[in-house]
């Protein structure tokens, strides 16, 4: 089903409430669209997601600013009519905090809500398992019989190709990069991920970042989504800051094709 500006698929095995999952995903999707369309003071539903994003900024860094909706509108990179704004336009958009852009956290937040719905309805986690994919963010719920979950990692250079796969228990997995949403002008590629300090698309030497957070971690979905974008923005020089973090693991691929991180990537 089309939600959260992407295609969402739900694969359920066992007695799990698919209709409940669809309901909460639709609710978050509607909230995300309305927060981008209208001035943020009128979007009271976003208070929970806003507070959680602020808490993540305080914990990990402030590269993610969900108040850049005006800047996102200005560039229009994910629309049919992207443009390179003037410096004056960028300065004005940076100072305009009226509109939210929840793109760096919405999918993860939605998967947190889906996880809560599953846990609420499923007191026995042995009764089944589910895979909820919003393309760049995935929830792996429950326990597969006699095996781990296997998740393929796409090449950031040729999306139809895979660089390998990872094995995990139940987890939230999010990937950020600039290879699928961008536009080109005068021979230069402009990513959809914007730098909230410069007002321009991020300048990073990383091609993609995948973050894995166990479902036992509170708010693990929004954490995985937030961190994949933050690490991507920060670039390879910032990877050392996350190598020894016990709360999550990650795989980063730089623009030269080198693979970094602290989670095993298995060959296909």
Image: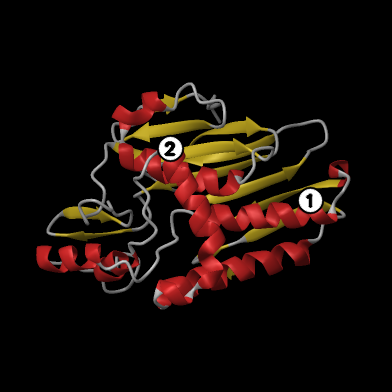
User: Taking 197 as reference, is 242 left or right?
Assistant: right
Residue marked by disc 1: 119
- Residue at the (11%, 63%) spot, across then down: 87
Say above or below: 193 vs 33.
above
Front residue (pair 231, 191): 231
- Residues at marks 2 and 1, CA–CA distance in whole angstroms: 28 Å
Q: Residues within 10 Å of mark 1 (few under 14, many from 20)?
A: some
Q: Quadrant of residue 11?
A: bottom right
Task: Answer with left or right where residue 214 lies relative to residue 90.
Answer: right
Q: Nearer the viewer, mark 2 or mark 1?
A: 2
Depth check: give the residue in front, 8 or 171. 171
Closest to the observer, 251 or 230: 230
Q: Which residue is mark 2?
A: 60
- From the top left corner, tell me how far across and down residue 132 is, in percent: 66, 53
- The answer to which quarter of the image holds residue 39 is bottom left
In this view of the protein, can residue 105 be seen by the observer?
Answer: yes
The residue at the point 69 percent across, 58 percent down is: 10
Total residue callouts? 2
Q: Secondary structure at mark 2?
A: helix
Q: Is residue 84 visible?
A: no
Residue 169 is situated, as x and y percent measured from the top left of the image, at 70, 33
Q: Position of residue 153 (x, y in %)?
A: 51, 39
Q: Which residue is most to the top?
A: 244
Name which residue lies at 81% across and 60% down: 17
Q: Residue 143 lies in what quarter of the image?
A: top right
| Mark sitting earlier along the chain (2/1) | 2
Depth check, front residue: 261 or 166: 261
């Amino acid at each position: 089903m089309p939600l959260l500006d992407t295609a969402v698929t739900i694969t359920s095995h066992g007695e799990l409430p698919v209709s409940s999952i669809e309901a909460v995903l639709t609710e978050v999707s509607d909230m995300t669209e309305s927060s981008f369309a209208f001035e943020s003071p009128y979007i009271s539903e976003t208070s929970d997601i806003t507070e959680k994003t602020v808490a993540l900024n305080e914990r990990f860094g402030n590269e993610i600013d969900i108040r850049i909706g005006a800047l996102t509108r200005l560039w229009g990179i994910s629309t049919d009519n992207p443009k390179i704004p003037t410096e004056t336009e960028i300065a004005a958009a940076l100072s305009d905090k009226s509109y939210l852009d929840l793109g760096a956290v919405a999918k993860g937040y939605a998967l947190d809500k889906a996880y809560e719905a599953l846990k609420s309805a499923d007191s026995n986690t042995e009764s089944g398992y589910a895979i909820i994919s919003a393309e760049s963010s995935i929830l792996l719920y429950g326990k597969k019989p006699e095996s781990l979950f296997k998740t393929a990692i796409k090449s950031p250079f040729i999306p139809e190709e895979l660089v390998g796969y990872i094995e995990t228990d139940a987890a939230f997995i999010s990937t950020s990069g600039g290879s699928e949403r961008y536009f080109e002008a005068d021979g230069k590629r402009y990513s959809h991920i914007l730098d909230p300090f410069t007002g321009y698309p991020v300048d990073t030497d990383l091609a993609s970042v995948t973050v894995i957070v166990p479902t036992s971690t509170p708010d693990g979905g929004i954490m995985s989504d937030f961190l994949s974008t933050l690490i991507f923005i920060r670039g390879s020089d910032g990877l050392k800051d996350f190598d020894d973090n016990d709360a999550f693991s990650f795989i980063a691929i730089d623009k030269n094709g080198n693979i970094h991180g602290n989670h095993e990537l298995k060959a296909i």
